[in-house]
């Protein structure tokens, strides 16, 4: 592989790893992502395989949460329109009006947590680059010091 | 006042039961609010283009989340959604589902990758990814069209709320009734405001705009629920007890629509969410891809606060209307115009003080202005940056670019005003058409461009053309005839049933995918440079704050992007 630019960041990682790099970290270090094909259906790197497993799991649950209740209501109208105890909603109404948006929110939270965990597993540290990027970045990029 | 079919359309555009008159305190509230936006814009004004387009890529999680929320929640969320739920019952919930759940798809498939790609506008992505000025131009035209169609709904919402705050000035402009005069007035204010403020401190402004509109909405709901004895502290869950009393029209499934229409509409709204230029551009503004992800979670949370509340507002408003005015359902029933302001009506019918109703109404105007600002900026930058500067006049000076940008904002304003004088549909549906367009043309390009490295220029051109044509067919069938007096909409009932304008992406999207993939397969693969940019978008390797994928791939990020 000719001009890829992984050298400098690899050096960084050996320091920040602190020796925790397991098999996943090794694989990450040995991967040249710019030579590995991007394919949604047939991922070519170990990281992409792990990532897409999370993505597809979330996607399937999401499809069920979004169109499951309305399809069930279409197929079994009487069962789905019974009134819920305590809240008083017809079941189908609650699952659609409250259930679907809430599921999407919880799934998003779950995905972001999973994705962070994946970064950790592979020994990827965004924090180091964020601060390094800021120092070496354009001086004009003053952010007014408002970052949290 | 009944809005029966024999009454000319213009007259039924005045919402009955709404207290239309000039009100000093609410008017001062709106003016003060606009002044505040301008002041914030002035304090956080920007000097260079990097800051102008992508806010220096310095925005953090919560702030970007609020900006996503403000950008997102327009008059369609604030007014239109409750209106649809009140009038169309269970079918109205498609907007609640379609306008929230799409963010998950955006998150898992696109948010971080977009941050890594790191361009300035949506047409920029299409043009650079597919190495084609033609594709860039189609994307820019689509962006302009989206801004136009989307803003019609906003103009309608602003005008209806404006009637409550400023009163009826029908006849001041010859031939125009009170609603139409208000459309003109509100659009003049909006365009003037945009010309003054530009993109100055837009992100800071959006955080403030979000705060204003969510407080107005939730406080309104809490007070309406409490004073009428509907609810105590959690109206979002307590309105369930009320549903049984509202009549079967409110909750009966598939009473006003088929199961197919339900699925088609939600699908269209979801993919539209993932293709709207003013939404996508929010991911270019953040400091890192991790922020891109978490700010999506925050954004969705902020959006959900309003979307959990809107059905409750619709339920309270429906009940109050039935008790105080006329039965909501049956003949004559509530008119479309009255339903569009059900949120304001609910507050007014609860006998709340005028300034409080004014706050609820002002929130609607804040929502509409925040979104129109985002849309018009996206639309005008598509014309000035992507078409004029990149294609027509590559040596354009800064002054020329800004002039073209301003002119396109005015053009958008004029077009929108004209179309909003006699709008063809409800606010939510009008906005829905823009989603169908974004989902038909832009989403497939972003998705395939990001996830399939072999998608190429001819594929993109063929796909986008197909998407535009596919979207136009039901629009010509259902919407255009309402503007032509000699025609009756829809032209073909069968087409309207299976390819409804509001849900056309369900048909168009798979066709565009197939066309793009097929044409890409039979033509030459994109060059290795392009493929490496796509791979860089998916690499887990962290990138610097100011880097775009292209920089890393070409030279390790030593020189800035050269477009």
Image (cartoon, coloured by chain):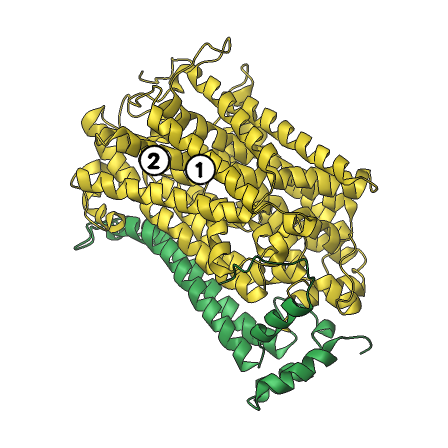
Q: Left or right of B182: which side holds A99?
A: left
Identify the residue at image location x=20%, y=26%: B324
Residue B33 rendering spot, x and y as whole percentages: 43, 36
> Is residue B433 or residue B238 the one in the foreground?
B238
Q: Which chain is green?
A: A
Image vertical order of residue B418 relative to residue B174, above or below:
below
| Quadrant position of the N terminus of chain A in the picture | bottom right
Q: Left or right of B41: which side holds B319?
A: left
> Is residue B109 or residue B412 the one in the foreground?
B412
Chain ID, mark 2? B
Residue B84 is at least partly visible in this image: yes
Identify the residue at image location x=47%, y=46%: B70
- Mark 1 and mark 2 in contact (Cβ < 8 Å)? no
* Residue at the limit of the structure toward the bottom, as seen here: A19
Q: What distance separates the C-alpha of mark 2 from that of mark 1? A: 10 Å
> Is residue B269 or residue B422 the one in the foreground?
B422
The disc, 2 or 1, on the residue closer to the chain's N-terminal end is: 2
Chain ID, mark 1? B
Residue A111 rendering spot, x and y as whole percentages: 47, 67
Instruction: State the hue of chain B.
Output: yellow
Query: How many numbered marks appear?
Result: 2
Image vertical order of residue B20 relative to residue B295, above or below:
above
Identify the residue at image location x=64%, y=73%: B541
Label 2 CA crowd tier, 10 Å (few <14, some 14–19, many 20+): many
> Is residue A118 or residue B164 the one in the foreground?
B164
In terms of image quadrants, where is residue B325?
Answer: top left
* Residue at mark 1: B366
Instruction: Give the label on residue B359, or none.
Output: 2
Whether marks 2 and 1 lie on the same chain: yes
Residue B240 rendering spot, x and y as whole percentages: 22, 47
């Amino acid at each position: 592989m000719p001009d890829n630019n992984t050298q400098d960041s690899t050096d960084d990682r050996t320091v920040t790893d602190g020796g925790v790099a397991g098999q996943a970290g090794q694989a990450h270090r040995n991967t040249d992502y710019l030579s590995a094909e991007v394919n949604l259906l047939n991922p070519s790197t170990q990281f992409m395989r792990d990532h897409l497993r999370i993505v597809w799991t979330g996607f399937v649950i999401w499809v069920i949460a979004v169109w499951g209740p309305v399809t069930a209501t279409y197929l079994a109208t009487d069962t789905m329109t019974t009134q819920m105890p305590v809240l008083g909603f017809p079941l189908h109404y609650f699952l659609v009006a409250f259930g679907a948006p809430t599921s999407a929110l919880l799934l998003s939270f779950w995905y972001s947590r999973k994705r962070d965990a994946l970064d950790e597993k592979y020994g990827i540290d965004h924090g180091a680059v964020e601060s390094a990027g800021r120092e070496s970045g354009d001086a004009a990029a003053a952010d007014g010091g408002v970052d949290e | 006042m009944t809005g029966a079919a024999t009454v000319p359309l213009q007259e039924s555009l005045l919402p009955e039961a709404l207290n239309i008159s000039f009100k000093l305190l609410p008017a001062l509230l709106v003016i003060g609010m606009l002044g505040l936006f301008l002041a914030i814009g002035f304090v956080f004004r920007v000097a260079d283009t990097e800051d102008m387009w992508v806010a220096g890529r310095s925005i953090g999680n919560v702030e970007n989340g609020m900006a996503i929320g403000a950008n997102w929640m327009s008059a369609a969320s604030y007014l239109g959604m409750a209106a649809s739920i009140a009038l169309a019952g269970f079918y109205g919930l498609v907007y609640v589902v379609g306008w929230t759940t799409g963010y998950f798809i955006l998150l898992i498939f696109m948010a971080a990758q977009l941050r890594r790609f790191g361009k300035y506008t949506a047409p920029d992505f299409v043009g650079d990814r597919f190495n084609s000025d033609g594709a860039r131009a189609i994307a820019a035209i689509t962006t302009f069209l989206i801004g136009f169609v989307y803003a019609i709904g906003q103009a309608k919402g602003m005008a209806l709320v404006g009637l409550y705050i400023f009163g009826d000035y029908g006849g001041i402009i010859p031939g125009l009734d009170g609603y139409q005069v208000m459309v003109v007035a509100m659009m003049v204010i909006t365009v003037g405001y945009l010309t003054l403020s530009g993109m100055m401190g837009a992100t800071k402004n959006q955080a403030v705009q979000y705060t204003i509109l969510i407080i107005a909405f939730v406080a309104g709901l809490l007070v309406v629920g409490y004073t009428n004895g509907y609810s105590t502290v959690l109206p979002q869950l307590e309105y369930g007890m009320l549903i049984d009393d509202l009549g079967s029209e409110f909750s009966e499934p598939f009473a006003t629509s088929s199961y197919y229409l339900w699925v088609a509409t939600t699908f269209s709204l979801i993919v539209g969410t993932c293709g709207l230029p003013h939404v996508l551009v929010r991911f270019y503004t953040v400091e890192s891809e991790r922020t891109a992800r978490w700010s999506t979670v925050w954004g969705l949370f902020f959006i959900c606060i309003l979307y959990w509340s809107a059905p409750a507002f619709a339920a309270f408003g429906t009940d109050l209307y039935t008790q105080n005015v006329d039965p909501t359902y049956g003949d004559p029933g509530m008119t479309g115009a009255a339903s569009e302001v059900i949120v304001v009506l609910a507050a007014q019918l609860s006998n709340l003080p005028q300034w409080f109703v004014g706050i609820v109404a002002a929130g609607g105007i804040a929502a509409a202005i925040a979104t129109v600002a985002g849309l018009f900026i996206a639309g005008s930058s598509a014309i000035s940056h992507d078409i004029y500067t990149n294609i027509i006049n590559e040596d354009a000076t800064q002054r020329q670019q800004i002039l073209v940008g301003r002119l396109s904002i005015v053009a958008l304003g004029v077009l929108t005003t004209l179309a909003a004088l006699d709008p063809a549909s409800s606010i939510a549906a009008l906005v829905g058409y823009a989603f169908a367009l974004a989902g038909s043309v832009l989403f497939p390009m972003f998705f395939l461009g990001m996830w399939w490295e072999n998608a190429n220029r001819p594929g993109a051109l063929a796909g986008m053309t197909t998407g535009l044509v596919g979207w136009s067919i039901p629009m010509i069938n259902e919407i255009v005839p309402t503007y032509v007096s000699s025609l009756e909409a829809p032209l073909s009932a069968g087409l309207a049933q299976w390819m409804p304008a509001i849900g056309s992406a369900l048909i168009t999207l798979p066709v565009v995918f197939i066309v793009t993939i097929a044409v890409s397969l039979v033509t030459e693969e994109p060059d290795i440079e392009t493929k490496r940019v796509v791979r860089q978008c998916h690499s887990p390797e962290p990138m610097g704050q100011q880097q775009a994928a292209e920089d890393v791939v070409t030279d390790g990020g030593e020189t800035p992007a050269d477009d």
